[in-house]
């Protein structure tokens, strides 16, 4: 039943009640009949005038309710329009304000879901290409070896190529694994252990020893004398440093050095990884921590990846109450700095 109908019925019932009381008074001679007629006429006129005045006063409310109903239907179809020009009671104005807030939050959630779906589709598409390419290469080279089409002198070249493609697949699976672990562990409190900085650097650098040797790289390390240990999550720091050093190698040519510096400032540890490679354009630097974002848009296998490395590293750094900053210049290289508190506070 509509609100205006309810108002009409309420006035009608009130009028019928008055007429019944007047009729009862005349019957038992409480009022004279001529007076009863006058009273009845006055009540009818008063009720009609009151209804007209009430209806006019309620018109803005009726209009606001129709607006709420219309916008609710639009909201159900994915149109996130906010309500404006509400001129009615304070309660309806607050309801419209709450409706607008709900609409705003739903729109943000909807955009986030849509963005996640697009990222998922992009990741599946990228992975399909990035996985298929090395597998196809490995398959063709193995088939050539099996068919005895490769001479003994060419065998080392083929095996090296197969090894390169396998390592590429390994990097892809490592990034996906790190991404999965990061997503699953978002609500898990990080561990807090005593970590010796020189030891963790040695552990990470040892993972790249073969690549350092093959690419004739020099590793320059300059750590402040004050640096000794911090209390944080060892696995998280290891993962961040591994990604940053891996990126430095990936985006700089063989033969160029990798420089690692460290200092302590305001009770925070700062470790910088510097390469002398291609660098990052200034307009791209604000986007590099986004999920699936890649500065190098081509499918060049040298720079191939899922675009998850820096996203994962930044998320882990945030979890450790830290952050990663970049300073880069095209053609001169990039410096990524990891900043962490010396003492990771216990999560509450």
Image (cartoon, rainbow, N blue to C red):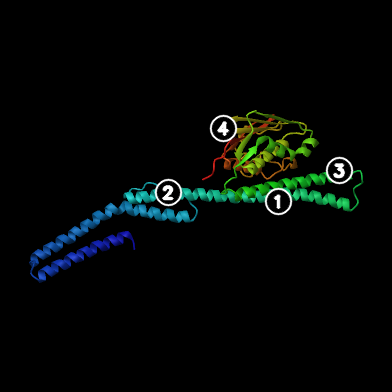
Kindly identify the residue that appears in the image at 24 percent across and 57 percent down: 51
Instruction: State the residue position of label 4.
Output: 267
Mark 2 surroundings: few (<14), some (14-19) or many (≥20) residues within 10 A: some
| Outermost right residue | 152
Q: Earlier in the sequence, mark 3 or mark 2?
A: 2
When asked about the image quadrant of residue 70, the answer is bottom left
Instruction: State the residue position of label 3.
Output: 157
Kindly identify the residue that appears in the image at 65 percent across and 28 percent down: 225
Q: Which mark lies nearer to you, 3 or 4?
A: 4
What SS does tag 3 mark?
helix
Quadrant in the picture for the N terminus:
bottom left
Q: Which of marks 1 and 2 is nearer the N terminus?
A: 2
Q: Earlier in the sequence, mark 3 or mark 4?
A: 3
When asked about the image quadrant of residue 33, the answer is bottom left
- Nearest the camera: 334 or 97? 334
Q: Is residue 308 left or right of residue 5?
A: right
- Nearest the camera: 320 or 318? 320
Mark 1 surroundings: few (<14), some (14-19) or many (≥20) residues within 10 A: few
Report, in whole angstroms, how far the alpha carbon at label 1 lies from the one at label 4. Answer: 45 Å
Q: In this view, does 82 lie to the left or right of 38?
A: right
Instruction: State the residue position of label 1.
Output: 128
Instruction: State the residue position of label 2.
Output: 100
Report, in whole angstroms, how far the alpha carbon at label 4 lies from the one at label 2. Answer: 44 Å
Q: In this view, does 109 lie to the left or right of 66?
A: right
């Amino acid at each position: 039943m509509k609100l205006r109908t309810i108002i009409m019925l309420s006035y009608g019932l009130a009028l019928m009640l008055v007429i019944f009381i007047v009729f009862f008074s005349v019957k038992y001679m409480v009022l004279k009949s001529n007076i009863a007629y006058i009273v009845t006429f006055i009540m009818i006129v008063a009720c009609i005038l009151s209804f007209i005045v009430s209806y006019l006063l309620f018109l803005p409310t009726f209009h606001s309710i129709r607006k709420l109903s219309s916008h609710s239907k639009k909201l159900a179809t994915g149109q996130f329009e906010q309500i404006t020009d509400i001129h009615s009671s304070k309660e309806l104005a607050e309801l419209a304000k709450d409706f607008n807030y709900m609409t705003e939050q739903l729109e943000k959630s909807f955009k986030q879901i849509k963005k996640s779906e697009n990222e998922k589709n992009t990741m599946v598409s990228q992975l399909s290409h990035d996985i298929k390419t090395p597998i196809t290469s490995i398959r063709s080279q193995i088939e050539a070896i099996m068919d005895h089409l490769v001479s003994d002198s060419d065998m080392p070249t083929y095996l090296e190529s197969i090894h390169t493609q396998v390592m590429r697949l390994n990097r892809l699976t490592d990034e996906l694994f790190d991404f999965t672990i990061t997503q699953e562990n978002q609500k898990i409190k990080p561990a807090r252990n005593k970590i010796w900085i020189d030891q963790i650097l040695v552990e990470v650098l040892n993972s790249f020893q073969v690549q350092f040797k093959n690419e004739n790289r020099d590793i320059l390390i300059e750590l402040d004398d004050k640096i000794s240990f911090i209390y944080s999550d060892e696995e998280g720091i290891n993962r961040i440093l591994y990604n940053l050093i891996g990126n430095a190698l990936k985006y700089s040519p063989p033969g160029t050095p990798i420089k690692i510096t460290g200092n302590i400032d305001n009770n925070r540890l700062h470790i910088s990884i510097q390469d002398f490679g291609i660098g990052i354009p200034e307009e791209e630097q604000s986007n590099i921590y986004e999920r699936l974002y890649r500065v190098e848009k081509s499918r060049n296998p040298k720079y191939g990846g899922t675009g998850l490395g820096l996203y994962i590293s930044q998320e882990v750094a945030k979890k450790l109450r830290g952050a990663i900053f970049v300073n880069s210049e095209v053609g001169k290289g990039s410096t990524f700095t990891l900043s962490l508190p010396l003492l990771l506070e216990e999560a509450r």
